[in-house]
Image (cartoon, rainbow, N blue to C red):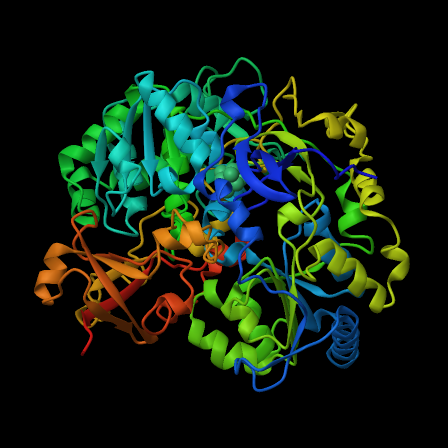
């Protein structure tokens, strides 16, 4: 057994949902959490805890915690509940699930729950796999477009680190990102680099907390980042500042693309050859040759012909697109001065190495994948890339997460159609844990009016009575991460594998998500898959024969975190060519084989903008992670009420004073909240921090204004993203 008793200080890991997984030292007094400190990692660079992590005692001890299981006793959302036992709740739920599964098929029971190689993330995954149920893939809730771009460019979902991890940058562009309040460890790195002489430039429609710590801030019209990146490439190529060595050796740039069908030229296109290797034009030999051929100098520009097939290097095609985006044109699109576009471009290409922190903000527009691809291409043509991946661990995850094979996946933005139209398959039961779905999904009116009435069973496990829980049939009290044991693998910054120790016993009748999954699994007749102890399942997860796990076991983890070691040879990119692909032959059918600028769907330059002239964005808050921590007193005190930030000029035009109650509306709905007049947001743009609960508004909720339009290209690559930052609204003073 893991020894959870006795110590005055317990080492554990922050399990809040930003996945950095900072080590915590929790001091206990009389069995209660007294103080939270950063864990003393050997390397000081790894130490540190953000304000949210320091406030976690308030999460555990909040008087508003759910205490026992509840069953709905009136209409959904009426607030009428009856207290029931765990046994009764899980008996009912299991019977309901089995009935739905029999009537509509197993995938009709969907799970909006994390799937992580850990106990609490993996317990539900076991049930999904064993039942043949479906899993709601939540990346589309605002985080799918950047990964779509990275899958296209790098063959992997989280490639933005290739742009930011360049060692010892002389220049850092913080683009559509506000790490000063959202990503503690990135900001620490940025501040340290700045102390060592790195120039920091922020690009954002808001003068954010990060901008206040930068050397220069550039305001940009929301949704126009693609144009800026293309304009910067235009200047760089005009000035001859591109890194031809990097383009030639590490990108798709020299590979020949056929004029007739946009596909890469392959060996099999040459008569008498069968291979699928790619071809280049060797300037030394004056002929087409294999890209694998040693001693060649592949051409980056020009038109070539092979056996009647006309071809051009992919880089030549990029240059052609980029030529359209002159600084003058880009200034008109983005609202950035022409001179600034030129200066940014020249600096980024010549103050090397230069980093880009490519934020989640730029990918929350309808064409956010194109914006992220354009920024990736900008980094690629300047060689400002660090293609080593951070070290990590490979656990023995598959048998634990998917004991009966992989799950059926349902993209988040397909959930409504599944419930209402039965497409791509019917969904009639939904289990939600680790998600405040109704609060966080776009087009909230559609969720309320279409999704919910079509669900026959809706279960929520949570710490609090969120708006999602309010509309459930059963609400189950979940334990916090400080009340449960688990394995934690860091991501983004830290590369430790760590033991998340239970710090205090679960309060009230709460259970950890793993305990809930085990109990439910048994009720579903899957007892033989849930018959081990937590410790035994962790031992199973650690029993991996991958070299990264050599010498790592539970006893070793009890002694402290284990840091991953870098592979000696960096792994090759997982793209088709093994190179950075700014050109995509598979996206040619959409006319998006190269990044191009397309006006936002809700552009302030459309007819619609005559009625709704302001662009709404919903930046991330500093005192919550999405909607979590709203019930933690220390955090809630700092942000007690939803506000809309509006520029002084826009406010004046509408006769709005600071603190006035205003109405914000568009064709989808209307929200009432207080205004905060700000010189820090650009004219024409308004911001409501995401994650507020409905109770924080005077009336309504911001996601009654956001749309759920599906981008087919993103759908093809991975899944469509919610374009939370691509929304037009009007604001007016609310009648008294
Ligand atoms: S940075 Fe993330 S993981 Fe670290 S303490 Fe803050 S919320 Fe927790």
* Image quadrant where one finds the C terminus: bottom left
Q: Position of residue 697 (x, y in %)?
A: 34, 68
The residue positioned 55% from the left and 76% from the top of the image is: 471
Task: Say if residue 707 shows up in the picture.
Answer: no
Q: Position of residue 224 (x, y in %)?
A: 28, 49
Q: Nearer the viewer, residue 542 or 41?
A: 41
Q: Is residue 231 left or right of residue 76?
A: left
Q: Nearer the viewer, residue 200 or 436?
A: 436
Q: Is residue 611 left or right of residue 477?
A: left
Q: Nearer the viewer, residue 299 or 527?
A: 527
* Image quadrant where one finds the N terminus: top right
Q: Nearer the viewer, residue 65 or 653?
A: 65
Q: With respect to residue 413, does 183 lie above or below?
A: above
The residue positioned 50% from the left and 70% from the top of the image is: 467
Q: Is residue 275 left or right of residue 347?
A: right
Q: Position of residue 623 (x, y in %)?
A: 40, 49
User: Which picture quadrant has residue 65?
Assistant: bottom right
């Amino acid at each position: 057994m893991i020894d959870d008793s006795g110590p005055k200080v317990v080492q554990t890991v922050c399990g809040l949902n930003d996945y950095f997984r900072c080590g915590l030292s929790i001091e206990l007094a009389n069995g209660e959490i007294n103080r939270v400190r950063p864990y003393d990692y050997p390397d000081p660079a790894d130490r540190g805890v953000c304000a949210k992590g320091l406030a976690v005692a308030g999460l555990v001890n909040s008087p508003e915690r759910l205490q026992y299981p509840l069953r709905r006793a009136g209409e959904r959302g009426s607030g009428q509940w009856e207290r029931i036992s765990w046994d009764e709740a899980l008996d009912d739920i299991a019977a309901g699930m089995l009935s739905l599964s029999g009537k509509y098929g197993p995938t009709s029971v969907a799970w909006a729950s994390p799937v992580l190689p850990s106990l609490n993330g993996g317990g539900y995954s076991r049930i999904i796999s064993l039942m043949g149920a479906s899993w709601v893939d939540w990346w589309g809730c605002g985080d799918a477009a950047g990964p779509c771009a990275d899958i296209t460019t790098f063959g992997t979902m989280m490639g933005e680190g290739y742009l930011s991890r360049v060692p010892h940058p002389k220049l850092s562009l913080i683009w559509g990102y506000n790490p000063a309040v959202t990503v503690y460890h990135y900001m620490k790195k940025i501040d340290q680099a700045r102390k060592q002489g790195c120039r920091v430039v922020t690009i954002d429609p808001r003068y954010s907390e990060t901008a206040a710590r930068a050397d220069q801030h550039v305001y940009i019209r929301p949704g126009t980042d693609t144009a800026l990146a293309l304009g910067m490439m235009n200047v760089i190529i005009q000035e001859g500042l591109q890194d031809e060595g990097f383009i030639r050796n590490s990108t798709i740039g020299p590979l020949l693309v056929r004029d007739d069908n946009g596909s890469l030229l392959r060996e099999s296109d040459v008569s008498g050859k069968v291979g699928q290797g790619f071809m280049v034009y060797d300037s030394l030999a004056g002929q087409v040759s294999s890209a694998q051929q040693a001693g060649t100098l592949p051409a980056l520009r020009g038109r070539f012909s092979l056996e009647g097939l006309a071809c051009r290097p992919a880089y030549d095609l990029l240059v052609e697109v980029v030529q359209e985006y002159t600084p003058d044109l880009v200034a008109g699109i983005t609202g950035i001065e022409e001179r600034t576009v030129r200066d940014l471009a020249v600096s980024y290409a010549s103050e090397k190495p230069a980093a880009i922190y490519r934020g989640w903000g730029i990918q929350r527009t309808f064409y956010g994948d194109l914006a992220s691809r354009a920024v990736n291409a900008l980094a690629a043509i300047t060689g400002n890339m660090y293609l080593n991946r951070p070290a990590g661990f490979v656990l023995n995850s598959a048998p634990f997460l998917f004991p009966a094979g992989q799950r059926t996946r349902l993209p988040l933005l397909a959930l409504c159609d599944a419930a209402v139209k039965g497409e791509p398959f019917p969904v009639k039961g939904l289990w939600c844990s680790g998600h405040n779905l109704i609060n966080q999904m776009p087009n909230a009116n559609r969720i309320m009016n279409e999704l919910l009435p079509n669900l026959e069973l809706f279960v929520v496990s949570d710490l609090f009575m969120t708006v999602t829980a309010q509309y459930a049939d059963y609400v189950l009290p979940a334990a916090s991460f400080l009340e449960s044991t688990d394995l934690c693998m860091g991501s983004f910054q830290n590369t430790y594998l760590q033991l998340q120790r239970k710090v205090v016993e679960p309060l009230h009748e709460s259970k950890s998500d793993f305990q809930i999954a085990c109990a439910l699994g048994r009720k579903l007749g899957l007892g033989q898959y849930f018959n081990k102890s937590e410790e035994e399942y962790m031992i199973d997860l650690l029993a991996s024969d991958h070299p990264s796990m050599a010498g790592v076991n539970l006893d070793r983890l009890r002694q402290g975190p284990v840091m991953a070691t870098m592979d000696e040879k960096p792994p090759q990119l997982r793209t088709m060519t093994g190179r950075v692909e700014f050109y995509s032959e598979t996206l040619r059918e959409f006319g998006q084989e190269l990044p191009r600028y397309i006006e936002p769907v809700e552009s302030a330059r459309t007819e619609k903008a005559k009625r709704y002239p302001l662009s709404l964005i919903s930046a991330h808050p500093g005192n919550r992670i999405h909607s979590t921590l709203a019930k933690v007193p220390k955090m809630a005190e700092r942000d007690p009420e939803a506000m809309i930030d509006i520029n002084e000029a826009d406010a004046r035009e509408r006769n709005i004073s600071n603190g006035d109650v205003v109405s914000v509306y568009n064709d989808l709905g209307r929200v009432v909240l207080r205004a905060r007049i700000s010189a820090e947001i650009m004219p024409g743009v308004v911001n409501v921090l995401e994650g507020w609960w409905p109770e924080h508004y005077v009336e309504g909720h911001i996601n009654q204004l956001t749309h759920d339009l599906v981008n087919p290209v993103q759908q093809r690559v991975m899944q469509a993203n919610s374009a939370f930052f691509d929304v037009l609204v009007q604001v007016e003073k609310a009648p008294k």
